[in-house]
Image: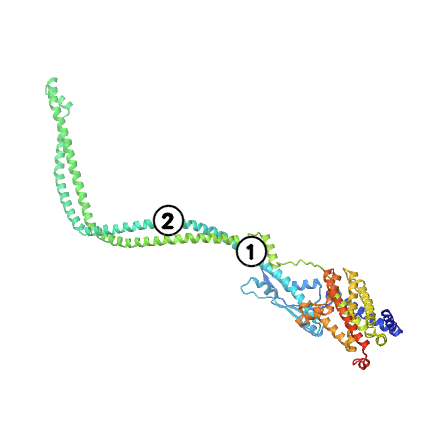
Amino acid sequence: MKFPTLVRTELQRLTSSPMSILALVALMLVPVLYSGLYLWGNDDPYGNLDSVPAALVVEDEGATQDGEDVDYGEQVRDELVADGTLDWQVTDAGEAATGLQSGKYDFVVTFGADFSRSLTSIGEDDPSKAVVELTTNDANSYLAGTIADTVTDTVRDSLTQEVGEKAARTLLDSLATIRSGLAEAADGSAQLADGSASAKEGADALADGAATAADGSDDLVAGLNTLNASASALPEQASQLNDGAQQVADGNAQLDAQVAPAAQRVDEAVGALPSEQDLRERLTEAGLSEEEIDQVVSLVDPVHTDIEQANDEVQGAAAAVQQLADGSAQLAEGTQQLSDGMPALADGIASAATGASDLSSGVHELSDGAGELDSGLDELKGGSRELADSLGSAVEEIPDQSEDERATAAAMMSDPVSVDEGATTAASSYGAGMAPFFISLAAWIGIYALFLIVKPYSQRAVTALRRPLPITLGAWATPAILGVVQMVAVFLIVAFALGYSIAQPAAMIGFMALTSITFAAIILTLNVLLGSVGQFLGLVLMVLQLVTAGGTFPYQTLPTPLRALHEVLPMSHSVEGIRQLMYGGDMSRAWADAGFLAIWLAVALLAAFLAITRMTRTRTLRDLRPSLIG
């Protein structure tokens, strides 16, 4: 009996009766139903979230921001209801709690009374976080809580962006004001530096002048002290001077009293002298001739002239005596005033000496202070220049933005990162993303189910033929062929019934066939080696692979021991290979996964061949005993 004959015989046995055919068809449909129904049911769960009931409770009392009334609770409520992502039911807290407990709502989202007030507190001295209260009930649905987390995260991100943009705009406007102030301060500090330089020049001059004044004040003190020592005798001397002046004034007054009448008489006498015309007339009347008159006139005229000159001199002397008398009287009066004021002058000089001493001390202090001022102004000059440079640098560090630029920057600050989504490969839907895992699992379940009716090997052939290779190939080929048919049917469901996009359809069919025949070899070997116990171990191995294949979460999230199993178990590589071929990934990785499955196929067939070889050579009572399981 050859290898094809063994396959044909087994297939004839499986289709020998209508009941057998029905059982075979039912088992053949197991992977199709498993993968098809599961993928259909989970094709687009996120597209049907609008049927998930959720309660929305808004207790927000609103707040005032920038002089305007805001109510973020109502705003978010309206946005969520309008978005329609979930079946939102706006209600109160009591109804929401009752509905969550009864299962009417999967979860409850509550915006408290202080929601808007907290959001607007960002500009206050003591800001507080706004709280979105999320209440779930895992007894209704565990994943509903995950969906609720996603929804609240979206709400939080949206509000964070909006509130953050307003806060950032306020901050940028404040920075613009600060920048303007810093620019003015920088200009002012530059002017201060220039002014301090000028002030330092003045302080240098002041210091020099104060030093000179200090020296002069010392000389003034010395002179005033000397003057004060001499001034003590001045009142007595002034009194003596006044006495002498009074005596002179009295003598001059007596002289004037004597001279003035004499001068008046002389003047009167001179006034009484006849003029030349009168003399000529009188001489003519006296009978003198013209010649005699001329002689007389010639003799009298010089005398007359001398008398007039003498009178002028007498009158001048009288006037001088009068002026002398008046002056000496004034002098006496002045000396009297001098004598009267001299004690006060002496006291004033003494006071001036004392004041000069105080002035000298003050001028010396001024000189010292001027030196310190000069030093301080030098430091002020350097500090103000450094301040001007620092303020100028600070101004340069703050962007000089227009109002529109600040609005753009605020929007960027509130939402600084945009996600530019791109994918080297991409699944067309959630179901398509899960398909590689469930196709691989369906392949294992399909082969496992077939071995419920397919004999692992022909005991008759083992006993009669004793040809292990045809027996091994015949035992493997029957479930392998049926498994390939199952995979073709699964592919048709995935590609056409569900409409998933497949990048490499021919290669994927081939890979799915390789997966199925590899699983057939593994389960065959378990059955050959251990009988029904091996069939049970096939179930255990399926569970292990279900956990470690990385079909749902990345395998890196597994515990370390399970991560090691991921690397060696075949389903992990069947999942990865189908992903590469279905999504259009790296063909080299698909070839590597195919090679890994081929190694499992070869090792499993070799193990089955060795076990059947042993059976063809030695048959014991143990081989004829029924299995412990059935």
Within 10 Å of disc 1 (Cα), the crowding (few <14, some 14-19, many 20+) is: some
Q: Position of residue 81 (x, y in %)?
A: 70, 64
* Residue 630 falls left or right of residue 190: right
Mark 1 or 2: the one toward you:
2
Identify which residue is drawn at 72% across, 62% down.
589
Q: Quadrant of residue 567?
A: bottom right
Tell me the residue that label 1 is attached to: 173
First in sequence: mark 1 or mark 2? 1
Q: Nearer the viewer, residue 169 or 510?
A: 510
165 relative position to 446: left or right: left
Residues at marks 1 and 2 touching, judged by CB atoms closer than 8 Å: no
- Mark 2 = which residue? 202
Q: Is residue 384 left or right of residue 218?
A: right
The answer to which image quadrant residue 274 occupies is top left
Q: Quadrant of the C terminus?
A: bottom right
Judging depth in this view, the residue of 60 and 221 nearest the camera is 221
Q: Amino acid at mark 2?
A: Gly
How far, Cα to Cα, is label 1 from label 2?
43 Å
On the question of residue 221 being in view, the answer is: yes
**Kind of residue at disc 1:** Asp
195 or 73, which lies in front?
A: 195
For mark 2, give the secondary structure: helix
Q: Residue at x 61, y 57 (%)?
A: 412
From this view, report whether residue 403 is shown above or below residue 22.
above
**Mark 2 neighbour class, 10 Å CA radius: few under 14, some 14 to 19, many 20 or more:** some
Q: Quadrant of the N terminus?
A: bottom right
Residue 403: x and y in percent read 58, 52
The answer to whether residue 48 is seen in the rendering is no
